[in-house]
Amino acid sequence: MRTRAAVIFGVGRDWEVVDVDLDDPGPGEVLVRTRAAGLCHSDEHILQGDMTPPEDLIAEAGMESPFPMIGGHEGSGEVVAVGEGVRRVQVGDHVAVSFFPTCGECHYCVTGRQNLCDMGANAFLPGMITDGRRAHRLADGTPADPVLKLGTFAEHMLLSEDSVVRVEPDIPFTPAALVSCGVATGWGSAVRRADVRPGDTVVVVGTGGVGMNAVQGAAMAGARHVVAVDLVEWKREQAHTFGATHTAGSIDEALPLVQQLTRGRGADAVILVPGLMTGDLVAPALAMTAKGGSVVVTAIANIMATEVSMGLFDLAMSQKAVKGTVFGACNPRTDIPDLLGMYTDGKLRLDELVTRTYSLDDINQGYEDMRRGNNLRGVIVFD
Ligand SMILES: NC(=O)c1ccc[n+]([C@@H]2O[C@H](COP(=O)([O-])OP(=O)(O)OC[C@H]3O[C@@H](n4cnc5c(N)ncnc54)[C@H](O)[C@@H]3O)[C@@H](O)[C@H]2O)c1
Ligand SMILES: [Zn+2]
Ligand SMILES: [Zn+2]
């Protein structure tokens, strides 16, 4: 079939909305009509060249250019066709996508760490997860793989059934989309990865579409102090409505505040979720971390970035941890429905995350609004 999709043709270029041809769903595959897609910063990273090695290194390694690439990895929709042998969903089901597929059988899936599913590695190789074929093509026949095998910035998505999670039909599509990346990642960064406990002091650096959910996750887990750090003033004000007890305009401003709040002990967890992760954030984050505490790195750095400087003596002698996380260490198949259940129960604020909605054709405006700090989350809504 033919659909329309926002495609990245190369680093630094604008999004281009073009026609894309999709195969019919093969064995284990589903066709989803997209209904909502969140503008997560990770797609901006692809556009800026943070997520892919420089073109000359790709060519040197004899690899194919990842572009053109269909964008979008946060989204929801309705199943409109299923291929042979599909067990998990049927036509008419509402689904959220899962940016790491979950096979249910690998070492990580069976030990309750679906966010690390071995099949996730295939999400970076060309072609469908199911059989490797190039099932997405531009009108001239050029293959155009979707981001993480999803491609939510398209009117239709051809996916492996391992990349979708069924959600209750009474849940609106926009919150279902948000939970598929930003909400679970932020909430889980606090609740699952930082393991926030009642009474803790937690600092969240960067309270955008992901970080604001680390704020609400920390508050939900019972943190006594939740310090929201963002460069943008209105986001700091918003943070209070998501459970922040204090705010700071920069990581440097947060340090004396945290020392004062904890009588010099420091924060039990510092969660780093700025738009772009850089090595220079780790030392100041560790400086405000208490003995035995953790720095959680959720934000994505440039793929070539390797440098970070930190006090190694303090790391060992104060028993601190610096740890990364993908999808906030959540399990897509249980945490996506559970988070949506908390939303239905009025315990998780999701509607309040959406600052603006856009049509697919306005995607460049949506990302421009993100760059300018105008949005907590922008969402593309499909009719
Ligand atoms: N680990 C994962 O699984 C995962 C999943 C989704 C997104 N991410 C990453 O998380 C990061 C955040 O994504 P997002 O969609 O929330 O982005 P966003 O642009 O919505 O929010 C980033 C926020 O950080 C603030 N900021 C930037 N630099 C800062 C600084 N030095 N100090 C304080 N605040 C600062 C910005 O003002 C903005 O409000 C991105 O790097 C994204 O790629 C990671
Ligand atoms: Zn994302
Ligand atoms: Zn698996």
Image: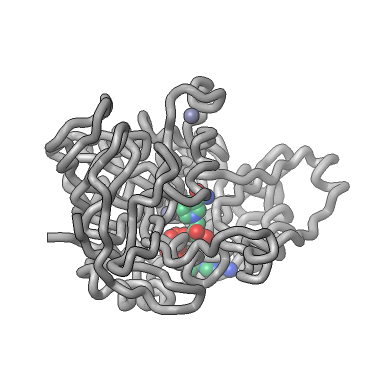
Q: In the displayed image of the protein, which residue is found farthest to the right?
A: 313
The picture quadrant where one finds residue 255 is bottom right
The picture quadrant where one finds residue 89 is top left
Q: The C terminus lies in which quarter of the figure?
A: bottom left
Q: Nearer the viewer, residue 232 or 240?
A: 232
- Residue plotted at (27% across, 66% down): 355
**Residue 341 horizontal/vertical position (percent):** 25, 34
Count of numbered circles in the view = 0
Q: Is residue 245 visible?
A: no
**Residue 300 horizontal/vertical position (percent):** 56, 58
**Residue 122 horizontal/vertical position (percent):** 51, 42
Q: Nearer the viewer, residue 134 or 107?
A: 134
- State whether residue 382 is above or below residue 216: below
Q: Nearer the viewer, residue 187 or 38?
A: 38
- Residue plotted at (52% across, 25% down): 106
Q: Nearer the viewer, residue 277 or 197?
A: 277
- State whether residue 127 is above or below residue 250: above
Q: With 324 as the anchor, is 330 left or right in this view?
A: left
Q: With 54 as the anchor, is 96 left or right in this view?
A: left
- Residue plotted at (40% across, 37% down): 130
Q: The N terminus lies in which quarter of the figure?
A: bottom left
Q: With 290 as the anchor, is 236 left or right in this view?
A: left
**Residue 36 horizontal/vertical position (percent):** 23, 55
- Residue plotted at (28% across, 72% down): 17
